[in-house]
Image (cartoon, helix red, strand yellow):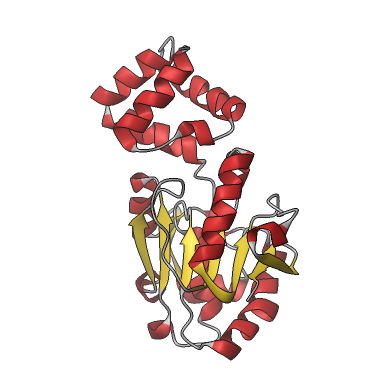
Amino acid sequence: MNDYQWFIENIKRKTGIDLAQYKEAQMKRRLTSLYEKRGLKNFQEFFHAMEKDEALFHEFLDRMTINVSEFYRNAKRWEVLEKKILPKLFEQNRRLKIWSAACSTGEEPYTVAMILSKYIPLAHVSILATDIDENAIARAKIGLYTERSLQEIPEEMKKKFFKKEGMYYQIDEKIKRAVTFKKHNLLADPFGRQFDLIVCRNVLIYFTEEAKQQLYYKFNQALRPGGILFVGSTEQIFNPALYGFEIEDTFFYRKIK
């Protein structure tokens, strides 16, 4: 067993996270740069160091899950959600059940809440947002963001839902209350059911093909008939019918009834 395989087995035993389902070359490169920065020589040293240092463990999770996010990332896709997808979903149900999967530090579910606020009172909005990284979830709950995170956000939304505090922007409490954050491992934990919309963007690209295929099936099962899966702009599903989906728009997939 090589050094990295030993690391994979011990991480799975410790956390339930199966690194074998992530693309190996990418993951090894990312984690090697982290442990070398700390003056460690190999994955075994890295694992033992994490057992003693909680901050290093959270840094590992951050590096593993690529917590890079921003509001309205790839803004044109959010416009499609607002103008085309949501009106159709609202025809069937005014109280949508929504899940933001692998939500990182919260920009994505908060973007969904802001868009929904144009259609319905925020008091009627309830979004489940999940991530494997408890540190990212803690930051999401605080709701404090840098200027860079707000680059693509429409100016009226920025004025309405953010207050500048020094170098940061604090998101409005009404938006925060619309989102419930929970820890969840996409590859290991059970999924909910009967969602109208699942947003899972810019995470599937890090998984192996086998892991991705499993997730497409699981997302399909988690949606109600006619529900929508919204993926990232490098995550096109090339044979959606194989997983029970049809193309609704670019990067939007409808569960076949």
Which quadrant is the C terminus positioned in? bottom right
Residue plotted at (71% across, 62% down): 241
Q: Nearer the viewer, residue 188 or 173?
A: 188
In this rendering, does residue 212 appear at all? yes
Q: Residue furthest left?
A: 52
State whether residue 224 is above or below residue 39.
Answer: below
What residue sits 70% from the left and 79% below the top?
A: 84
Q: Nearer the viewer, residue 207 or 46?
A: 207
Which residue is rendered at x = 72% and y = 54% of the image? 236
- The vertical placement of 153 against 97, above or below, is above
Look at 50% across and 88% down and name the residue there: 94
Q: Please, which residue is most extreme toward the top here?
A: 41
Position of residue 68 relative to residue 83, above or below, is above
Tell me the quarter of the picture where residue 237 sits: bottom right
Question: Which quarter of the rendering shows the N terminus?
Answer: top left
The part of the image, by quadrant, that contains residue 57 is top left
Q: Percent from the top left, x then y, of residue 23? A: 59, 32
x, y percent for residue 255:
62, 70
Percent coordinates x, y for residue 174 in the rendering: 38, 76
Up the image or down, 2 lies above or below 16; here it is: above
Residue 69 image offset from top left, x and y in percent? 54, 51
Total marks in image: 0
Residue 254, image quadrant: bottom right
Would residue 153 be visible to someone looking at this image?
no
